[in-house]
Image: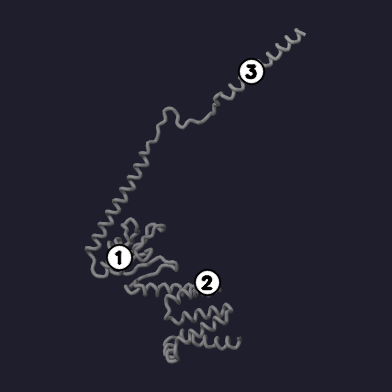
Amino acid sequence: MDERMNIGKRFPTRIGGGLVVMVGALTLSACATKHVHEEPIIEQGDRVDDGSAAVYEAQQRAEARRRQAADQQDIEAEALATCKGEVCDAVVRNEVWIGMNETQVLAATGTTEDAWNVRRAGGSTVMTPRDAAMVPSDAVGAVAMVQLAGGNVSRYGYQERQGVRLVSNPDMATTEGRAAETAEALLREGDELAAAGRLDAALDRYDRASILAPEDPLIDYRIASVLDKALRPYEARIQYELFLHRLDLEEIEARGDANAKLAEAIALAQQRLVVLERSR
């Protein structure tokens, strides 16, 4: 019995010692430093970029802008020193104008010669944008072309949604002149769309033109004709009546005799009204 007790005392002692050893080993394993291989940010002997290249480029850009601003100030001063009347007013409001010289065009558009391709032939000079992605602009819009004759602007064009709108006299540069030119462009576009059978698109152009040129009765006729072709008889009848009612009988006769196109439109409108009335 004493022997068994002695064995029992010795056996737990060995097990306990084993447990202590295992726990200690696990503790040391958990606390051990893990080594992860990472690529070095820089190698020995490499030099860190101090940003001097970026700083230099920024300084160069700033200097280029400063020179351009100085050039534009010189251009504007020269333009104002050599202008008179309406041309001076146009330079001040940054708008290209008939009669300007080349320097005044640069001042009105806030550009230098670098912004333009310039063709010269005899007494004619044509200025067009050097970069299609950076078209020079004045207070009105993007300037697509400027032509000078004898050193002064004879005509110029704006790049607009309907194409290039040309200005060849001061009246065309007024708000009314611009509206009339835009209306004409819309009418041409509408006629082409109507001829191609794109009636909804044609109607859109005619409606927009009627806002810009409300005194033109032929726009009402165009609208009526398109509505008629689009099988919208009620709207077409109203538009035909509007067209005819805007002209009294005496004016119809007078303008009809002088304008064959208007006379034809009047006759066709009257015929279509009869047909549409019968189909109601």
Quadrant showing the N terminus: top right
Q: Is residue 212 above or below residue 74?
A: below
- Disc 2 versus disc 1: distance between alpha carbons? 36 Å
In this view, which residue lies farthest toward the right?
Answer: 1
Q: Amino acid at mark 1?
A: Arg
Which marked residue is nearer to the observer: mark 2 or mark 1?
Answer: 1
Question: Residue at the spot x=24%, y=66% of the render?
Answer: 83
Q: Say which of 89 and 156 sits in front.
A: 89
Q: Position of residue 219 (x, y in %)?
A: 47, 79
Amino acid carrying mark 3 in the image: Val
Position of residue 63 measured from the top left corner of the image (x, y, whole percent): 30, 48
Image disc number at residue 93: 1
Residue 16: % across, % down = 67, 16
In the image, taking residue 155 as reference, residue 235 lies left or right, namely right
Quarter of the image where one finds residue 173: bottom left
Q: Amino acid at mark 2?
A: Ala
Q: Quadrant of the C terminus?
A: bottom right
Q: Nearer the viewer, mark 1 or mark 3?
A: 3
Residue 182 image point, x, y percent: 42, 72
Q: Earlier in the sequence, mark 3 or mark 2?
A: 3
The residue carrying mark 2 is 201
Which callout, 1 or 3, points at the residue further toward the start of the chain? 3
Q: Residue at x 40, y 73 (%)?
A: 179
Residue at position x 45%, y 77% in the image: 210
Q: Mark 1: few, some, or many residues within 10 Å (few <14, many ≥20)?
A: few
Label 2: which secondary element: helix
Which element type, helix, strand or loop, lies under badge 1? loop
The residues bearing labels 3 and 2 have C-alpha atoms spaced at a distance of 91 Å
Circle 3 or circle 2, nearest the eye: 3
Residue beneath disc 3: 20
Viewer-side residue, 144 vs 107: 107
Q: Earlier in the sequence, mark 2 or mark 1?
A: 1
